[in-house]
Image (cartoon, helix red, strand yellow):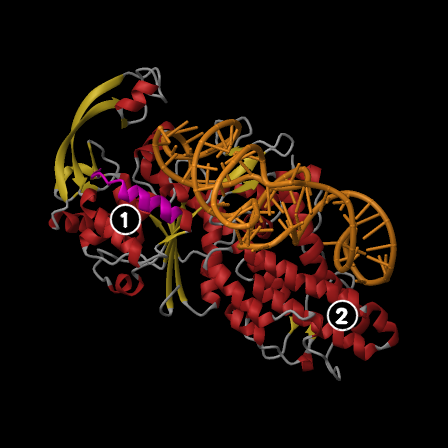
RNA sequence: CGCGCCGUGGAGCACCGGUAGCUCGCCAGGCUCAUAACCUGGAGGUAGUAGGUUCGAUUCCUGCCGGCGCAACCA
């Protein structure tokens, strides 16, 4: 995916008019897994996230609370960052679009597009809803029975306003040519097909400014207008890395981005409008846009599923609640293993508990417990000095290096659920099966040397698993990696998939994990399925 | 006929033109190092439906039925 040592990845920036929900978290975690993986592949990663603050909704939300927009967005940014930190998101930068660096870059950019002759002024007339602060199409109004579908009691006004427009309609052919030449520009495939048919059906010029607002970025060649939120939002990807600043060297190094991770609903902005804007300004295009799916809420009793929304009686699941109730690792594991990143997924508390218990408590956590307990019980934690070890015995015929190759591809193509599925079914299953086949707890009474050989292999399994799950469950992975004193291994921060094949010498293999009464404390205590739902 | 997605054992998913796999759950057996965990085996599906293409379709095409997204607090 990346052609050089650097890897620039972004997520969509979020409207801070409400706290993040599990869907936004899904996106950030998916991007984070990719960022962590790329770091493990020794790429110099720059992982950008941020908030989209130059919107009417934000100033309205602030107004309702009786505060100025600035302190409001700063406080929201603080709250978002709190959640991202709790979820172990490893972003390198977080941009707020109200920051000066963004304003400066936006103005330079819109000027460049203006200079390229792609911006013109046009009067726009239509029915305006004060409730929505937006124009309504005649069709919408007609279908709603003569009023705004969202604000039936608010009067519609006939309004005429002069705005600036971007000549998006000029770019259809160039966009289609780009999709053709770069098949991976839009992923997954279903999104790509959607956009191609959209562009083929014809693009219309888009309004890129609004008149009479003070919260927003002024249009440099007409200070009465502010830049419309969509035009400015997309620009965060370049303003955050220094486009338009005094020193653009960082921008020169990082751009173009390797991938924009976004929700499937905004693919059209990223795959049509954004590349057209960049073409106009003479900048290169991002290498890939990945439109992930949505997470729906499900009621296990009725089988009904729906898109989360504050207006529904069930309310919204707060990511922080799940993190506090279970753990960030459990949160990440659920969404990455159960929801295909490119498609849609479902969430329910019942299933969350099931997945947690079987995948984390019973399989992953229990393997850790039984392995360490035996090492301590039979050898006081010191495994050094085994005479002969069949290093591949624990794999039971599994071709580990082939698997690692497959996993690399799966992760790079965002097929996280498949990757995790294979780690669990192939590697964890092999390790657990190995114990049941070799019966080290019996060998401990009859053949200590053979028992030690088995445990040395299990320690190796722990090490391999630690590395494999590092992008997904960074905390658990570190615990696994630090359970033993491995000889001559790279420090945790630098361990990557390439190290899986570098099996350490067992000469000084020792358990160094914290123990309570001779055994490790459960990494994932089982949870009561029914209690979890409340 | 606006656009698009989806419909596979109780639940969630996968694969593939040649008579269905995986995870969870359930049942039985094994084991006891381990978080009543682990391992093995089993029950359970005429793949929404009606046609078509084919030597043969769950897999390709069409119609129909059903669910959903594309407008809104919200990704």
A62, above or below A186, in the image? above
Assess disc 1: are there few (<14), some (14-19) or many (≥20) residues with their C-alpha within 10 Å of its C-alpha.
Answer: many
At numbered mark 1, what does the secondary structure look like: helix, strand or loop?
A: helix
Q: Nearer the viewer, residue A97 or A495?
A: A495
Q: Is residue A405 magenta?
A: no
The residue that appears at 58% across and 59% down in the rendered structure is A475
B63, above or below A279, in the image? above
Relative to residue A530, is residue B6 drawn left or right?
Answer: left
Residue tagged 1:
A274
> x, y (%) of residue A138?
26, 22
Q: Quick one: label 2 or label 1, which is nearer the N terminus?
A: 1
Residue tagged 2:
A375
> x, y (%) of residue A356?
65, 48
Distance (Cα) linking label 2 and label 1: 57 Å
A157, above or below A351, in the image? above
> x, y (%) of residue B2?
34, 32
């Amino acid at each position: 995916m990346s052609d050089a040592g650097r890897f620039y990845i972004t997520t969509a920036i979020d409207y801070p008019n409400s706290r993040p929900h599990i869907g936004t978290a899904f996106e950030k975690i998916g991007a984070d897994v990719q960022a962590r993986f790329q770091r493990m592949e020794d790429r110099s990663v720059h992982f950008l996230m941020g908030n989209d603050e130059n919107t009417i909704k934000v100033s309205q939300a602030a107004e309702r609370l009786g505060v100025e927009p600035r302190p409001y967005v700063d406080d929201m940014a603080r709250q978002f960052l709190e959640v991202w930190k709790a979820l172990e998101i490893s972003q390198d930068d977080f941009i707020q679009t109200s920051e000066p660096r963004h304003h400066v870059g936006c103005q330079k950019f819109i000027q460049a597009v203006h200079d390229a002759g792609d911006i013109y002024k046009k009067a726009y007339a239509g029915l305006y809803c004060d409730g929505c602060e937006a124009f309504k199409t005649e069709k919408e109004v007609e279908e709603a029975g003569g009023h705004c579908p969202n604000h039936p009691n608010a009067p519609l006004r006939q309004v005429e306003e002069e705005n600036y427009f971007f000549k998006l309609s000029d770019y259809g052919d160039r966009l289609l040519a780009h999709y053709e030449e770069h098949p991976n520009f839009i992923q997954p495939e279903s999104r790509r097909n959607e956009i191609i048919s959209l562009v083929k059906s014809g693009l219309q010029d888009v309004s890129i400014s609004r008149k009479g607002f003070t919260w927003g970025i002024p249009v440099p060649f007409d200070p009465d207008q502010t830049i419309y939120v969509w035009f400015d939002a997309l620009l965060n990807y370049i303003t955050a890395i220094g486009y338009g600043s005094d020193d653009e060297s960082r921008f020169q190094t990082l751009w173009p981005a390797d991938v924009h991770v976004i929700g499937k609903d905004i693919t059209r902005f990223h795959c049509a409008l954004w590349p057209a804007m960049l073409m106009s300004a003479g900048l290169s295009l991002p290498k890939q846009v990945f439109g992930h799916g949505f997470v729906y809420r499900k009621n296990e009793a009725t089988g009904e599923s729906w898109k989360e929304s504050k207006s529904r009686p069930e309310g919204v699941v707060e990511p922080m609640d799940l993190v506090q109730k279970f753990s960030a690792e459990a949160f990440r594991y659920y969404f990455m293993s159960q929801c295909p990143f490119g498609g849609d997924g479902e969430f329910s508390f019942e299933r969350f508990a099931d997945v947690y218990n079987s995948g984390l408590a019973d399989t992953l956590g229990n393997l850790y417990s039984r392995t360490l307990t035996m090492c301590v019980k039979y050898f006081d934690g010191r495994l050094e000095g085994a005479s002969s070890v069949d290093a591949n015995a624990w794999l039971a015929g599994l071709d580990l290096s082939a698997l690692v190759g497959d996993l690399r591809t799966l992760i790079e193509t965002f097929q996280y659920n498949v990757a995790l599925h294979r780690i669990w079914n192939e590697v964890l299953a092999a390790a657990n099966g190995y114990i049941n086949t070799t019966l080290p707890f019996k060998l401990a009474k009859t053949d200590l040397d053979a028992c030690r050989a088995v445990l040395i292999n299990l320690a190796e399994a722990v090490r391999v698993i630690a590395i494999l799950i590092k992008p997904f469950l960074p905390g658990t992975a570190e615990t696994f990696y630090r359970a033993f004193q491995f000889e001559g291994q790279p420090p945790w921060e630098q361990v990557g998939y390439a190290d899986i094949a570098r099996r350490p010498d067992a000469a000084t293999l020792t358990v160094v994990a914290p123990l309570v009464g001779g055994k490790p404390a459960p990494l994932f205590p089982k949870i009561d399925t029914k209690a979890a739902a409340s």
